[in-house]
Amino acid sequence: MYQYYVRSLGTTPVVIDSFINLAYTKKMNDVGSATITVRRDHPAVSALALDDEIEIWRQRNGSNQVDFRGFARGGAWRLANNGRLVYDIFVVHEMELLRRSINAYKAGLEAASQYTNFAADTAMITLVSNNFLNATQSIANSHPRLTQATSKVVAAGAFSAFGSRVATYGAAYKNVLSALQELADVDKSMFYITKVSSAWFFYVQPVTVTTDRRATVLFDVDAGNMQDGELNQQRVGEMTVGFVAGQGDGNSRAVEVLTTAARNIGSNNYEMMVDARHLSSSSSLQAYGDGVLNATRYRPRLRFRPAQLPILNYGQHYFWGDVVTARLAGQSFVQRIMQVTVQKNAQGETLDLGLEDIP
């Protein structure tokens, strides 16, 4: 079993190894969080300051690793079930740095608020460089950047362009994290922040570079490493026919009707209206409508909690972002670990995974 401890790197460093409960979640391309519950008189209650850096360490058999890094953002007093007063320390994942800034450049500025004929991954690097690489830099027609002395500056890490899909994208006044998430969807890429020495670096890479362990990591009830498994095959909410309405009014409005044999039209006819008034050409309406319909298409969903076993456990045999195989009721799924949630208390360690199916 893994042991856990929490370390703060603030003005008053403190180690938390006697917590009541520890829970944290890491998310791919998003901001996770952690909650550390301590007794009322724990030194951390008074020692932690806003934005103190927090590290959560996992250790086993002499091997230590930081599994979560973030920043203290206050906490809450509450009465536990036993009537004791406890304090919950709240921590946001380091990816939250990307959510703190708005891309405050006026519309129409190429490579600042507008990206025309840019590969999506290159646009992401440029977006981060504009907003974080130099907190005092100024681009014409931008708003002044307000920077606190304690702000963390995120630099763009080493980068080799890999994007093949070209994005034309407007980012004026968008939240930086939201813009990065939208651009990542174009190329199905993964972005993250990591600390090197005393600085944070931003990286973007193809999601396919995560380790593919589908042949060696198998979750199966018969193997004893799958808990609370559920294979959901409900077909509620799927749409199979799209009336995609583009520009124009009345009889002159452009409309494309999307039907495909793959959606079982006739025996499984569910219609929806798709508002695409920002588009006019037949090809653009069809492409947009396909995207909307595909988001509702039927997909069997397998969800489960992994059991931590000596021969298969998180942090040793598989990791956040890996590709694994799961099997239930005779059906196999190849899935990517998009999210990891860990909880540790006196009752032991529990683990939950957020999974994305890979076609």
Image (cartoon, rainbow, N blue to C red):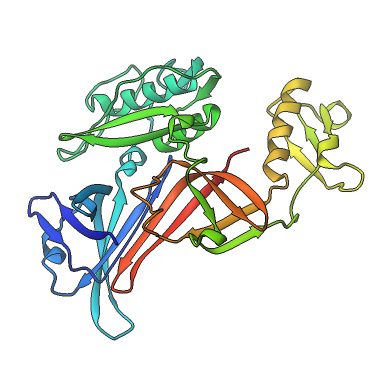
Q: Is 239 placed above or below 205 here?
A: below
Task: Please provide percent x and percent y for residue 216.
Answer: 48, 43
Quarter of the picture holding the N terminus: bottom left
Quadrant for the C terminus in the image: top right
Residue 338 appears left or right of 139 = right
Q: Is residue 202 toward the left or the right of residue 170 in the image?
A: left
Residue sitting at the far left: 12
Q: Residue furthest bottom?
A: 83
Q: Quadrant of residue 102?
A: top left
Q: Position of residue 38 (x, y in %)?
A: 21, 70
Count up the numbered dots.
0
Question: Residue 109's x, y, as percent?
Answer: 43, 17
Q: Is residue 241 visible?
A: no
From this view, report whether residue 289 is shown above or below residue 117: below
Towards the viewer: 62 or 274: 62
- Tell me where residue 30 sits by quadrant: top left
From what the image shows, is residue 107 above or below residue 265?
above
Toward the right, the furthest residue is 266
Q: Position of residue 301 (x, y in %)?
A: 63, 53
In the image, 359 versus 162, the foreground residue is 359
Q: Is residue 347 visible?
A: yes
**Residue nearest the observer in this picture, 105 or 8:** 8
Is 256 on the left or on the right of 72, as rendered?
A: right
Tell me the residue at 24%/47% (across/down). 66
Residue 170 position (above or below residue 300): above
Residue drawn at x 24%, y 60% as measured from the top left: 3
Which residue: 45% across, 58% down?
Answer: 352
At 7% from the left edge and 54% from the top edge, which residue is drawn? 12
